[in-house]
Image (tube, grey):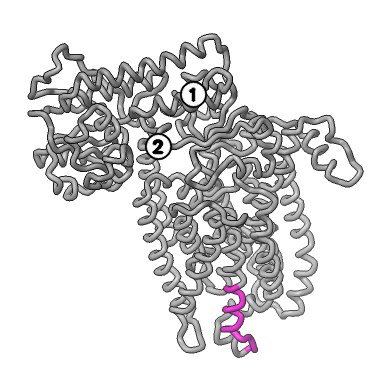
């Protein structure tokens, strides 16, 4: 009987793990046929506007949305960054940036409640993940809904973020702001790529997602950032976006830089140095263990460039100030 | 089958004759079991995702002996991997396996129920709730050098069992059926609370899930101190009660008439087994199947006499879990597979094979 209960729990947990992985910014969505919007010459968006969201649904937006419910932390950041923050009336509870977003009504993106979402009377709902026909249910209630699944596979990951920002610009009639934001982000990415143009092979890195040694593999969005930085991800070959590495593999592959995205779990350079068996790892001996905010590094939003710049400083202190 | 013809399974023999026969029969199987355990430990130490030659592993381990400097020329990382990571993993997996095997046998004996396992009356669900509560809380993983997750798991497991025991208690007796029901209900409450914490803290679901499925990836020598102080005394007590558990199999009333203080024995043995299980779960997470299947395997191989069933369950449990953990860290290298998946996946076919074997022996 116990095992039955456990099995049920396991099943539920697996579903949720999937959700968490998607939330972490990994490409869970289907390929995006024609998702990149045709860039319009005019700033004024001609409504009604038809777009294709990242799971291939056709979404018709009748007029400029004024009551957006954003159930995606990345979309929330993008909306505020392109000046559409005033049109956002509700966000999910992990939308903690910018500060102003936290003043909006809060909804739950992991266990979305149809009634709660409908209750805020949105005219546009943005999801990053559909736990099962939520989008269709909302549409049946007459609420326009788009699934802005996270980004596709690397190395186009940053480009996919750009596409998503442009798409949001169109949907909300902030096309020019979106273009400006993308241009700024692109310039910053270009600057980093230029500074690393002569690098053949960067340092070996281990990006720690949690204290049980989950990491971000090259197939994840985070892993894509490391690819831009030409780092050698020690999780290569694991075949999953977020594998849990065996401890002895980490010691054997000897990372030169360790990036901790699990500071909230109490992990720090000191706790890593104190781990038995880790004393001779290059990153520990060279004192190259750094902490990064998991929100900026894993969200496919405007701040991913910030994460890229921070990581560039950690990996190449001699090239970046 | 010769294995099943052994005296221990033969029906009521005079106590003295049984003891004499058992005395002859126990040592060979004990030697066989220990040899298997040693073999598993050697394999566990020699094989791993890091590519280290077996002779280097042997030299690293031998160099720990005073005055032996065989490993000086080997890479430091190999020495760290073998001594600080792989070896503690093997030892702790063995210890947890032994504990689950022994506790499972004890539970099955006390409840006289073949479906009993060490998690029956709430240890696992309570420990799971305790661990999950700490993982999703904003607390740091450790305070003042003491890791909170194992502490909360240990406490949660014991509280759940104590609650079940308290609920089931009628005057001075604790009817076993009531205790099982109370345990199942308490488990159910703890499990739903765990699920609630998981769904309301979606961002930490992976960490929680990893803990709930069990594993030895983060084993280190210091974790021995989480387990040994509870497991050793518990094992000593339980092993001494093999004969009384045999008597208890007749019927509680008959056992009482034969001079066994049934309620006291139940409390003592369930307490010892639960304490040991809680300690094991606190370092390894919830590893299913071992505590259920290992005692049955021993029973099928060597009969139901608890004087041999208890120690053999320990030895086989340790052997089984060391081998399961070896697979857990190698089949999907460089990633981990939760060891609970391996124990169920590989243990079940073996158990079915034993069942078939026994049928043929019976007919």
Upstream in the sequence, badge 2 or badge 1? 1
State left or right for residue A37 relative to residue B105.
left
Residue A226 circle label: 1
Task: Please name the residue shown 24% across and 32% down the image.
Answer: A147
Please count the marks in the image: 2
> Dot 1 surroundings within 10 Å: few (below 14), some, or many (20 or more)?
many
Alpha carbons under labels 2 and 1: distance apart:
16 Å
Asked if one can make out residue B244 in the rendered structure from this viewpoint, the answer is yes
The residue segment tinted magenta is: B258-271
Q: Point out the image quarter for the N terminus of chain A.
A: bottom left
Residue B139 within the magenta-colored segment of the rendering:
no
Task: Identify residue for label 2.
Answer: A295
In the depicted structure, whether residue A152 falls above or below residue B4:
above
Splitting the image into 4 quarters, where does residue B236 fall? Answer: bottom right
Is the stretch drawn in magenta largely helix, strand or loop? helix
> Dot 2 surroundings within 10 Å: few (below 14), some, or many (20 or more)?
many
Task: Please name the residue shown 53% across and 56% down the image.
Answer: B149
The spot of residue B331 in percent (x, y) is 57, 36
């Amino acid at each position: 009987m116990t095992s039955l209960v456990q099995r049920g729990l396991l099943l539920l947990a697996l579903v949720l793990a999937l959700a968490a992985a998607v939330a972490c910014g990994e490409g869970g969505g289907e390929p995006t046929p024609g998702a990149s919007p045709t860039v319009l010459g005019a700033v004024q968006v001609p409504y009604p506007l038809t777009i294709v969201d990242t799971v291939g649904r056709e979404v018709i937006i009748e007029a400029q949305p004024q009551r957006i419910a954003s159930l995606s932390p990345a979309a929330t950041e993008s909306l505020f960054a392109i000046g559409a923050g005033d049109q956002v009336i509700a966000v999910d509870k992990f939308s903690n940036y910018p500060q102003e977003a936290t003043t909006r009504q809060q909804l739950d993106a992991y266990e979305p409640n149809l009634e709660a979402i409908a209750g805020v009377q949105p005219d546009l709902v943005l999801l990053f993940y559909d736990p099962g026909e939520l989008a269709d249910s909302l549409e049946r209630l007459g609420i326009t809904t788009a699934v802005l699944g996270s980004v596709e596979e690397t190395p186009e990951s940053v480009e996919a973020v750009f596409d998503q920002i442009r798409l949001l610009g169109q949907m909300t009639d902030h096309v020019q702001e979106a273009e400006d934001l993308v241009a700024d982000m692109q310039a910053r990415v270009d600057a980093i790529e230029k500074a690393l143009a002569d690098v053949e092979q960067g340092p070996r890195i281990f990006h720690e997602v949690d204290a049980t040694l989950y990491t971000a593999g090259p197939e994840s969005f985070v892993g894509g950032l490391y690819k831009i930085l030409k780092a050698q991800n020690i999780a290569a070959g694991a075949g999953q976006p977020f594998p849990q590495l065996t401890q002895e593999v980490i010691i054997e592959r000897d990372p030169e830089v360790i990036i901790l995205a699990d500071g909230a779990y109490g992990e720090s350079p000191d706790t890593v140095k104190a781990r038995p068996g880790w004393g001779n790892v290059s990153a520990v001996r060279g004192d190259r263990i750094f902490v990064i905010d998991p929100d900026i590094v894993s969200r496919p939003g405007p701040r991913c460039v910030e994460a890229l710049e921070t990581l560039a400083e950690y990996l190449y202190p001699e090239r970046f100030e | 089958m010769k294995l099943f013809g052994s005296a221990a399974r033969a029906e009521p023999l005079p106590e003295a004759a049984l003891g004499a026969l058992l005395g002859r029969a126990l040592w060979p199987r004990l030697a066989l079991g220990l040899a298997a355990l040693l073999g598993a430990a050697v394999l566990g130490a020699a094989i791993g995702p890091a590519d280290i030659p077996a002779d280097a592993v042997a030299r690293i381990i031998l160099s720990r002996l005073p005055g032996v400097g065989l490993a000086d020329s080997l890479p430091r990382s190999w020495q760290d991997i073998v001594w600080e990571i792989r070896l503690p993993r093997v030892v702790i997996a063995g210890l947890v396996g032994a504990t689950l095997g022994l506790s499972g046998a004890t539970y099955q004996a006390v409840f006289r129920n073949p479906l009993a396992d060490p998690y029956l009356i709430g240890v696992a669900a309570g420990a799971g709730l305790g661990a999950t509560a700490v993982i999703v809380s904003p607390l740091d993983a450790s305070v003042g050098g003491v890791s909170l997750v194992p502490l909360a798991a240990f406490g949660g497991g014991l509280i759940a069992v104590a609650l079940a025991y308290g609920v089931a208690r009628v005057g001075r007796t604790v009817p076993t059926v009531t205790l099982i029901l109370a345990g199942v209900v308490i488990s159910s409450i703890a499990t739903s609370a765990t699920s609630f914490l998981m769904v309301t803290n979606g961002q930490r679901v992976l960490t929680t899930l990893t803990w709930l499925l069990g594993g030895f990836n983060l084993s280190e020598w210091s974790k021995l101190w989480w387990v040994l102080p509870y497991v050793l005394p518990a094992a000593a007590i339980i092993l001494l009660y093999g004969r009384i558990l045999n008597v208890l199999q007749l019927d509680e009333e008959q056992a009482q008439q034969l001079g066994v203080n049934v309620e006291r024995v139940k409390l003592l043995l369930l307490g010892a087994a639960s304490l040991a299980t809680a300690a094991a779960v606190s370092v390894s997470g919830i590893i299913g199947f071992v505590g259920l299947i290992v005692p049955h395997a021993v029973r099928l191989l060597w009969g139901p006499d608890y004087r041999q069933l208890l120690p053999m369950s320990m030895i086989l449990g340790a052997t089984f879990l060391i081998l399961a953990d070896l697979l857990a860290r190698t089949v999907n290298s460089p990633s981990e597979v939760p060891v609970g998946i391996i124990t169920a996946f590989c243990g079940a076919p073996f158990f079915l094979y034993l069942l078939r074997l026994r049928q043929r022996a019976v007919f």
